[in-house]
Image: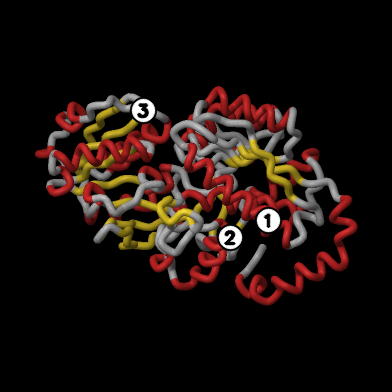
């Protein structure tokens, strides 16, 4: 666990001491191999690229600190998960059986995570999927699957009271049929109707049709306070541009999860005034004061500017709001592995038990703030934010504490055999 005080006090000394005293042992130590189910192509390829950068940076920091149990950590990428569930599942199997990795950080594509989860159990490999469909940690999860940041249901649970109180309870939900979009439609509809509101649902094929005007025409504005969208980033841009052409942004409140625009510039007229639920502020000046030292170091190491752009390409928007899921998966592994002195996959049962119920104080390893892993469903709970695009920039309107995102889970993986 890396606290701010420890980081500032021991950074140079710890690294120097390690190289002076332990370099010989380090060179001989068998590396711990962490696989990445990397989408190099497809709908989430840009997300995959940045998750990979975060993993490289996190592993570099861990190795600077002496690795895990005195062993270096090595990142091993898949060839290409392609944003296709069957391909991603095969890539996971290759990582484990051919490339001999010890753990796997998963794809950003929820469908790939769902397809892979049973294989993680059969191959007894701890898996950290990075998609956010609720089903990943509900009916399709198991004891080997851990979510290192939120799911759709946790985000909705955290934000629904603010949304109903400030935006309204009459929703039209327009969503892609992929798991990411379907999960949002199902969870929002259940929450809205339980609160006495109305939910009209419009499902859109994936990929979406070239002409979205026919979709826009289905929206009954007389029954809509909130227009909720649930698409991948490219299709979010197309949908909201089409909505803007019909002046919808001036007539209803527009809401979505930040993942839907997390690689898009907010300096577009069709995003002005729209609302988002996020797990991490894009802009550094919107990060809570007590977390800014951690945030600054996190951004520096991954290569993210204070405004949320790539340091090596000021035009490239970084998906920082979900990127920390991969970053902190490495530090979850480090914390749990060192608690049980993990040496090999034969000790995975002890590692899994250590992860179940783990608490993580705010630190460079957990820059989003203090968090915990719920033992029953292996989901990490953290703070959330309501952000709004104002003058072309995301502004935090509300910080919602992690306890507000707790919902009743339908599973208990702790009862499963290893």
Residue 301: give its label: 2
Residue 177: give its label: 3
Q: In this view, does 161 lie to the left or right of 72?
A: left
Q: Residues within 10 Å of mark 1 (few under 14, many from 20)?
A: some
Q: Is mark 2 on a helix, strand or loop?
A: helix
Q: Mark 1 points at which residue?
A: 60
Q: Is mark 1 on a helix, strand or loop?
A: helix
Q: Look at the numbered discs 1 and 2 and tell me whether their residues touch, using CB distance below 8 Å.
A: yes
Please tell me whether residue 17 is drawn above or below residue 228 in the rendered image.
Answer: below
Q: Look at the numbered discs 1 and 3 and tell me whether their residues touch, using CB distance below 8 Å.
A: no
Disc 1 from disc 3: Cα separation: 38 Å
Q: Position of residue 378 (x, y in %)?
A: 57, 44
Q: Look at the numbered discs 3 and 2 and tell me whether their residues touch, using CB distance below 8 Å.
A: no
Q: In which quarter of the image is the N terminus?
A: bottom right
Question: Residue visible at 37% across and 40% down?
Answer: 233
Q: Is mark 3 on a helix, strand or loop?
A: loop
Q: Which colour scheme is used?
A: secondary structure
Question: Residue visible at 81% across and 70% down?
Answer: 17
Image quarter for residue 179? top left
Disc 1 from disc 2: Cα separation: 9 Å
Q: Where is residue 312 in the image (x, y as percent from the top left)?
A: 50, 56
Of the residues under marks 3 and 2, which one precedes in the sequence?
A: 3
Please tell me whether residue 110 is drawn above or below residue 388 in the rendered image.
Answer: above
Q: In which quarter of the image is the C terminus?
A: top right
Q: Which of 181 and 164 is in front in this view?
A: 181
Q: How many labels does the image show?
A: 3
Please tell me whether residue 343 is drawn above or below residue 218 in the rendered image.
Answer: below
Q: How crowded is mark 2: few (under 14 residues within 10 Å), some or many (20 or more)?
A: some
Looking at the rendered image, the disc whose residue lies closer to the viewer, 3 or 2, is 2
């Amino acid at each position: 666990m890396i606290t701010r005080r420890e980081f500032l006090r021991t950074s140079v000394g710890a690294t120097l001491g390690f190289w002076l005293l332990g370099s010989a042992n380090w060179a001989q130590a068998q590396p711990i191999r962490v696989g990445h189910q990397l989408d190099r192509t497809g709908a989430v390829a840009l997300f995959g690229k940045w998750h990979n950068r975060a993993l490289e940076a996190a592993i570099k920091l861990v190795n600077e600190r002496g690795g895990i149990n005195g062993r270096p950590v090595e990142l091993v990428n898949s060839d290409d998960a392609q944003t296709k569930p069957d391909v991603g599942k095969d890539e996971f199997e290759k990582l484990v059986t051919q490339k001999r990795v010890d753990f796997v950080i998963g794809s950003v594509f929820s469908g790939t995570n769902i397809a892979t989860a049973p294989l993680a159990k059969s191959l007894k490999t701890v898996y950290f999927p990075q998609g956010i469909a609720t089903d990943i940690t509900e009916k399709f999860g198991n004891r080997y699957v851990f979510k290192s940041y939120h799911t759709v249901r946790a985000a909705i649970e955290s934000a629904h009271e603010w949304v109903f109180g400030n935006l309204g309870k009459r929703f039209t939900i327009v969503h892609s049929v992929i798991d990411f979009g379907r999960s949002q439609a199902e969870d929002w509809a259940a929450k809205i109707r339980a609160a006495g509101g109305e939910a009209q649902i419009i499902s859109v094929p994936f990929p979406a049709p070239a002409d979205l005007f026919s979709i826009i025409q289905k929206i009954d504005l007389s029954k809509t306070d909130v227009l909720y969208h649930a698409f991948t980033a490219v299709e979010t841009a197309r949908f909201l541009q089409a909505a803007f052409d019909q002046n919808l942004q001036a007539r209803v409140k527009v809401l979505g999860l930040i993942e839907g625009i997390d690689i898009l510039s907010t300096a577009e007229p069709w995003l002005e005034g729209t609302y988002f639920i996020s797990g991490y502020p894009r802009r550094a000046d919107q990060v809570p004061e007590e977390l800014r030292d951690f945030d600054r170091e996190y951004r520096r190491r991954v290569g993210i500017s204070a405004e949320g752009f790539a340091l090596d390409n000021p035009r490239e928007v970084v998906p920082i709001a979900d990127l920390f899921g991969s970053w902190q998966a490495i530090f979850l592994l480090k914390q749990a592995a060192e608690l049980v002195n993990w040496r090999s996959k034969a000790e995975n049962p002890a590692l899994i038990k250590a992860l179940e119920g783990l608490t993580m104080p705010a630190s460079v390893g957990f820059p989003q703030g203090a968090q915990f892993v719920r033992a029953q469903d292996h989901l990490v709970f953290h703070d959330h934010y309501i952000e709004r695009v104002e003058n072309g920039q995301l502004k935090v309107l509300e910080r919602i504490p992690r306890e507000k995102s707790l919902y009743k889970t339908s599973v208990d993986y702790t009862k499963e055999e290893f």
